[in-house]
Amino acid sequence: EAVIAGRTEVGFSFEPPEDPRLSAAFRRDLAIGAVMAPGHPLAQRQPLYLADCLAHPFCLPTRDLSLRKLIDAALPADGLVGRAFVEVNSLRMMKRLAAAGETVSFQTIIGLEREVGDGELVFVPLADAALSRDRFTMLTSSHRGLSHAAQAFFEHSVSAVGDRLSQIDADTAS
């Protein structure tokens, strides 16, 4: 909305709406994974499926976050019936709940790099075929060019994010 209104020149979003006023200048599809403390019983399980996680206390993002829509689409129709779970509107809170030890949360690796690198959290990509990847996008206006400063910021951001995501992919593959 801020890019469309001209209040900002570059935006970062997961699963942005299709809108002719927006130009998706950088896209990257990211795996959704289970996030948990290193001592959690599922921390070493490979492959790991959503159903495995739902057998433990878990945390879901609220329905207004794109991540939840992707998770809901991968769940069986009765997947949450009769299950007690926490629902929050903050990925940071989901991360904290997972780090506390017993709760599994779900998100992409973006925003978890430090905690995973330091061994505070484990990120295990989910293997469910029905679970789509979450699309990270950098947006600009399709009706306005970028100022010189915004163009420099955008180019730096594309390079930095692309390099970081490539490093994460390499770490995951090794």
Image (spheres, rainbow, N blue to C red):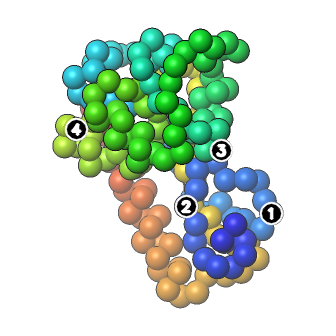
Q: Do the residues under discs 1 and 4 have CB atoms within 8 angstroms? A: no
- In this rendering, the answer to whether 65 lies above or below 2 is above
The residue carrying pointer 2 sits among few (fewer than 14), some (14 to 19) or many (20 or more) residues within 10 Å by Cα, namely: some
In primary-sequence order, the first of circles 4 and 3 is: 3
Q: Which of the marked residues, 1 or 3, is nearer the chain's N terminus?
A: 1
Instruction: Of the two numbered discs 1 and 4 on the same chain, state the one appearing first in sequence.
Output: 1
State the residue position of label 2. Answer: 12
Give residue 16's position: percent from left, percent from top.
Answer: 67, 53
Q: Amino acid at mark 4?
A: Glu
- The residue positioned 50% from the left and 72% from the top of the image is 154
Front in this rendered view, residue 105 or 138: 105
Locate residue 94, reporting x and y percent: 42, 39
Which amino acid type is shown beneath numbered disc 2? Phe
Write down the quadrant of residue 73 in the picture: top right
Kind of element beneath mark 1: loop
Mark linked to residue 139: none
Q: Which residue is mark 4?
A: 120
| Sequence order check, earlier mark of 4 and 2 | 2
Mark 1: give few (<14), some (14-19) or many (20+) Cα within 10 Å.
few
The image quadrant that residue 5 belongs to is: bottom right
Q: Nearer the viewer, mark 1 or mark 3?
A: 3
Disc 3 designates what residue? 64
Q: In this figure, which residue is indicated by the disc labeled 1?
A: 20
Mark 4 vs mark 2, foreground winner is 4
Label 3: element kind: loop
Residue shown at the point (78%, 59%) measured from the top left: 19
